Image (cartoon, rainbow, N blue to C red):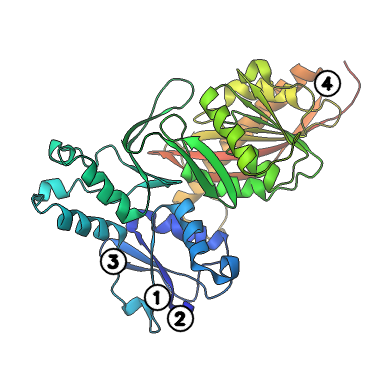
Amino acid sequence: MADLQSLVVVVDKSRIQSTINALDRNGLLDRSRRTIFQQGSGLVPVAQEPLPNNKDLLALDELLTTETGSIAFACSRRDSRKRTVVSPHTKLLKNVRESFADINSDQLLKEVPKSWERVGDVLIFPREAFRSPCWSALGDELWRTVATTFSVSKLARGHQIEGDGFRTPKLELLLGNNGWTKHRENGIIYVLDVTRSMFASGNTAERVRVGQLSCEGETVVDMYAGIGYFTLPYILKANAEVVHACEWNPVAVEGLKCALEANRVGPGKCVIHFGDNSKVCPVGIADRVNLGLIPSSEEGWTTACRALRPDSGGSLHIHGCVNVKSGSCLGAGPNTGLEPRQLKKMEHYRAWSEEAKMRIKVLLTQQHKSDWTVSITNISHVKPYAPHIEHIVVDLICKPTSNIQC
């Protein structure tokens, strides 16, 4: 075993922050050493203890691969900052050059991707990767070389999302008979066809947070459930009594059913309601409702309010996208420790959340014919969605002030 004190994870620069976040969430980031930036890649230090699964490096590889994409390790008994390492992109470039000597054009080599997303055993490249006809002419030999480099069995290209109401990814399968795969994240198995259902790796932190909620004895309604992005953490990590998963995409429902079986979820723990959320969502039973649709879940707010228990209320977790470009920064006092740009974003998050809170209060009053109190308990930033647009989720606690019907 190499000296773990000097263990580092090597990632391309585009994945440095997500790797730091993943290590930090799992208690594996070595804060005594700094991240080193080197030749388009980063060396992120890994703590000596604790490592998952009795310090098994294979388990660490799985954890980081599922959360951040393809990675590499470097170990040295000396200071790891002095060790020259090879980034995944450099390794791919080297293998392509060695396998295809005729590919020597700088313009062609620029199409060798520097970033990608790994979902299960599928590696997904940006749509501009390997676009030249010269690459296509190499056929499966090229794709097998690339797949071997990353130890995957399937390759796909393209990241566009169709505007079909299902948020279907527009992917071209380059290697493999179909897009079905099993993806592991935070100890949970997700099952999906990457060509027909998306997996938002940027939502990992929110899925982890959901799994840390205390939902013992609760009935949860997960609207826009998809393949079970949040349904599964509510069941397997947050210990919900039962989750009602509402979804109208038949392919996503098929993936969810397979995932329930793969994770050995017991009977009665998940009830799938197939169809339009506004029509199939159960009424008056929920202690907690999750609305994970972006860029906006607003069309489901009325349905979510109807789903809450009329006698005791419950929690709403509302996802949305916030424009943080406009407006001025009012500041939050001299001791916040935050930069003006961060303060400005937080003001936008708060303003959006306050507006959502007030609208939910009105909807609850209309739906249940009684007065309700609504409070913000948490606002979480999930990920950047587009330039100047941020994906956030606000947690609301909703309680009826009286059981007397007006």
N-terminal of the two: label 2 or label 3?
2
What's the residue type where badge 1 is placed? Cys
The residue positioned farthest toward the bottom in the image shown = 78
What's the residue type where badge 2 is placed? Asp
Circles 1, 2 touching at the beta carbon (< 8 Å): yes
Q: Which residue is mark 4?
A: 370
Q: Which residue is mark 3?
A: 86
N-terminal of the two: label 3 or label 4?
3
For the residue labelled by badge 3, is the local secondary structure a helix, a strand or a loop?
loop
N-terminal of the two: label 2 or label 4?
2
Please determine whether, in this image, residue 118 is positioned above or below residue 401: below
Q: Which mark is residue 3?
A: 2
The foreground one among 37 and 142 is 142
Please determine whether, in this image, residue 302 is positioned above or below residue 121: above
Circles 2, 3 touching at the beta carbon (< 8 Å): no
Labels 3, 4: front one: 3
Which quadrant would residue 151 be assigned to in this image?
A: bottom left
Q: Local crowd at mark 2 within 10 Å, few (<14), some, or many (≥20)?
A: few
Q: x and y percent of residue 307 in the render?
A: 74, 24
Q: Which residue is mark 1?
A: 75
What's the residue type where badge 4 is placed? Ser
Disc 2 to disc 4, C-alpha distance: 64 Å
- Name the residue at 26% across, 60% down: 91
Disc 1 to disc 2, C-alpha distance: 7 Å
Labels 2, 4: front one: 2
Left or right: 123 in relation to 101: right
The foreground one among 164 and 122 is 122
- Name the residue at 32% across, 79% down: 82
Please determine whether, in this image, residue 321 is positioned above or below residue 109: above
